[in-house]
Image: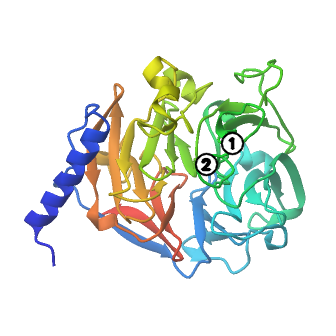
Amino acid sequence: MISPLRQMSRLLARGIALCLLVACNGTDGVKPTGVLELALEEVATGLDHPVLVTSPSTDGNRLFIVEQPGTIRIIKNGQLLPTPFLDIRSKVTRGPEQGLLSMAFHHDYATNGVFVVSYTNINGDSRVSTYRVSVDPDIADGSSEIIIVGAEQPYSNHNGGHVAFGPFGYLFIGFGDGGSSGDPQGLAQDLQTFHGKILRMLVRDDGTATVPAGNPLVGQPGSRWEVWSRGLRNPWRFSFDRLGGALYIGDVGQDRMEEISIRTAGQGSGRGSNFGWNTMEGTLCFQPATDCAPANGGGLVLPALVYTHADGCSVTGGYVYRGLEIPELDGSYFFADFCGGWVRSFRYLNGMIVNLVEWSALATPQITSFGEDARGELYIVSATGTISRIIRK
């Protein structure tokens, strides 16, 4: 057993490393959790590789769980329903970074019944589609699919796949750089592809979608007008703060660094941003130094927080806590590492990372995602088949 003093020393050592990596950027290191104690409350087990949990914004009684093989399950009033809400296993290719990867509910879901899914099809290519609920609120209409975005995938990794509705009801779609190692085709910076990008679209009440006129590349020839921001390696999970609309992106690194990038509403929540890949990996030049744009005023957005692979291997982005049950956490952004199993949080104030904390009681193996319910309470999703809610101990 590790003594409390030794455990604190480890946490402080991690904090010093993090502080050095982000040039301190206002942080005061990874701190022990102090007086507030958190715990995990198990809400579901035995799931088939869950990768997301979410809810419609007005639905306080149900949680929707995305299972990577191609099903969406419902926990209703604390019970896992036996029949899937949606089953598209016949359409999905399952791989380590493939399958049914995400879902999001339209902001007017209560009236139009429209939701969005992201998956890799049987050819291994990415598809983002809308579906509608059936007359049974616990069963989707499997015949209602409308494909709104598609992307051929050159490799089976870095397919990204996250979808989320953000400020003003727009749909944001994340794609990885297409895979392999080092983005060999330079797709993350290529404005003619969706790879390594976040897209923004307007989803209508009938499930069709269009490009908003305010997107940064609209009208520019030789570019994809859906693109909202670029230069990402694999934005597996991103989210918008419910209060203020800031965009938080967990972008998986190559060999050296994992990163969290943040764009506030005042910065356009990522509009037109270039997050640097594959010129930069985190705060380091990935390409030769002569090509490293930030050193030459290249206008790339550097991450707000990074950590090295001495501390993990794959960041899992999360959410800013805006629930009511633990008011001390208000404004804290939670994130994790898939390999390290640790869970940390910080606040982002005036462009600086503050109150960086590691929550040892929340450590969980293989964290694929966090989740947020209608009330703003947070959940941890483990590939081992478990969904747990973060609670006060």
User: From what the image shows, is residue 20 above or below residue 376?
Assistant: above
Reading the image, the residue beneath label 2 is 57
Q: Residue at x 54, y 33 (%)?
A: 275
Q: Are marks 2 and 1 in contact (CB under 8 Å)?
A: yes
Q: Amino acid at mark 2?
A: Ser
Q: Which residue is mark 1?
A: 107
- For image coordinates 33% across by 44% down, the residue present is 346
Q: Residues within 10 Å of mark 2 (few under 14, many from 20)?
A: some
Q: CA distance from mark 2 to mark 1?
A: 7 Å
Q: Position of residue 13 (x, y in %)?
A: 18, 53
User: Mark 1 or mark 2, which is nearer the start of the sequence?
Assistant: 2
Coloration mode: rainbow
Residue 122 picture location, percent across and down: 83, 66
Q: Quadrant of residue 82?
A: bottom right
Q: Quadrant of residue 142?
A: bottom right
Residue 227 vs 66, above or below: the answer is above
In the current view of this chain or complex, which residue is farthest to the right?
143
Instruction: Give the SS element for disc 2.
Output: loop
User: Which of the image's four quarters has the C terminus?
Assistant: bottom left
Amino acid under label 1?
A: His
Q: Quadrant of the N terminus?
A: bottom left
198 versus 142 height, above or below? above
Give the left or right position of residue 48, taking residue 359 as reference. right
Instruction: Name the residue nearer the viewer: 244 or 200.
Output: 200
